[in-house]
């Protein structure tokens, strides 16, 4: 276990679970859930300051200090490469020359499916600009490879639609992506429950990013803990290597000899 | 002078700096990032960057998100 290293952009992390910080009841619940998840990287969104409204109000950063967590600013809500690039440049300034970012350029408001053309454009600019880009994308192996070639430090295909909780709809595509890429592959979006996370890690994903599955559970803090365990179980299971499936051919686990005499 | 701040037009005293503006908005010392007419104004330059009538400013913070 000790030699199972998870690295993103040259930095080593103990947890393969990255969590979002949206959709919680309040900052205290956000903090409690993040801590229970064991996540070291947390995503944040970049939004306009509410001018004149409660200047003294607490902020997310008070509850999850950037000194204790690696912030992963995202471009959620951006529909063009230009907006995503501007947002992340602001994030870099906001977080003191912070380079690790999550790029997502959305295609439409109904599906929140990525706009892959704009994503590729933004990725090229951001990588050249010195960002370490973790990129949300569709589960297309060809596009995933292009994003790696552009220089993204992690590729993050969706398992199903953002916030849908539908789980892993196409494990075959994920496998193709995992097999072809040398940078970390993380499932981002669509996870609904702990078993989904385990399946993702069992498939060989290097990690997983989720928000709604925890925040919208009946007990978010407890689900956060479940996700931590699920990710660890999935990773261990992947490393252990599962037994081959033997369809229609049972194989008893107990000795076949030495049974007492069969009754007549 | 008039500034466009996060999409809203607001009146400010003439030729103030970015730092002055933050003071007026009671945001001094808060972690915010500012873009002026499409260009980032680094925190180290807030005190030296003088604003002009018609400038378009975006001012952002980190919030919860996935």
Image (cartoon, coloured by chain):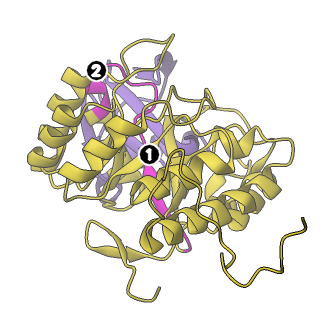
Chain colours: A yellow, B purple
Chain letter for mark 1: A
Q: Quadrant of the C terminus of chain B?
A: top right
Residue A245, above or below A168: below
- Choose mark 2 or mark 1, whichever is in front: 1
Secondary element under disc 2, as helix, strand or loop, is loop
Label 2 crowd bin: few (<14), some (14–19), many (20+), radius 10 Å: some
Give the magenta range.
A68-84
Residue nearest the observer in this picture, A255 or A27: A255
The residue under the point 41% across, 21% down is A113
The residue under the point 37% across, 78% down is A5
- Asked if labels 1 and 2 touch by Cβ distance under 8 angstroms, the answer is no
Label 1 crowd bin: few (<14), some (14–19), many (20+), radius 10 Å: many
**In this rendering, would B39 be left or right of B59?**
left
Query: Does residue A262 appear anywhere in the picture?
Result: yes
Tell me which corner region of the image, top left, top right, bottom left or bottom right, holds residue A170. Answer: top left
Question: Which residue is tagged 2?
Answer: A80
| Residue B45 pos. (x, y %) | 29, 54
The residue under the point 82% across, 57% down is A222
């Amino acid at each position: 276990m000790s030699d199972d290293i998870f690295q993103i952009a040259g930095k080593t992390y103990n947890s393969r679970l990255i969590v979002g910080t949206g959709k919680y009841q309040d900052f205290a619940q956000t903090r409690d859930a993040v801590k229970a998840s064991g996540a070291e990287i947390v995503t944040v969104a970049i939004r306009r300051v509410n001018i004149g409204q409660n200047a003294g109000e607490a902020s997310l950063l008070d509850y999850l200090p950037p000194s204790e967590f690696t912030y992963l600013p995202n471009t959620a809500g951006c529909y063009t490469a230009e907006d995503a690039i501007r947002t992340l440049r602001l994030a870099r300034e906001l977080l003191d020359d912070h380079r690790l970012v999550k790029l997502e350029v959305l295609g439409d408001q109904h599906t929140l499916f990525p706009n892959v053309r704009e994503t590729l454009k933004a990725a090229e600019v951001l990588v050249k600009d010195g960002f370490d880009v973790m990129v949300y994308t569709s589960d297309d192996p060809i596009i995933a490879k292009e994003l790696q070639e552009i220089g993204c430090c992690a590729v993050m295909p969706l398992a199903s639609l953002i916030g849908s909780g539908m789980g892993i709809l196409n494990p075959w595509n994920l496998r193709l992506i995992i097999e072809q890429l040398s940078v970390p592959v993380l499932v981002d979006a669509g996870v609904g429950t702990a078993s989904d996370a385990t399946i993702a890690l069992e498939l060989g994903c290097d990690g997983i990013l989720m928000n709604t599955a925890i925040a919208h559970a009946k007990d978010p803090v407890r689900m956060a803990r479940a996700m931590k365990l699920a990710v660890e179980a999935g990773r261990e299971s992947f490393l252990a290597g599962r037994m081959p499936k033997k369809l229609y051919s049972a194989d008893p686990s107990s000795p076949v000899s030495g049974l007492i005499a069969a009754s007549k | 002078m008039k500034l466009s701040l996060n999409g809203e037009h607001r009146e400010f005293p003439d030729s103030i700096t970015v730092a002055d503006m933050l003071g007026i908005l009671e945001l001094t010392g808060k972690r915010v990032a500012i873009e002026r007419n499409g260009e980032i104004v680094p925190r180290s330059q807030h005190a030296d960057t003088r604003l002009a009538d018609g400038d378009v400013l975006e001012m952002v913070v980190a919030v919860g998100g996935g």
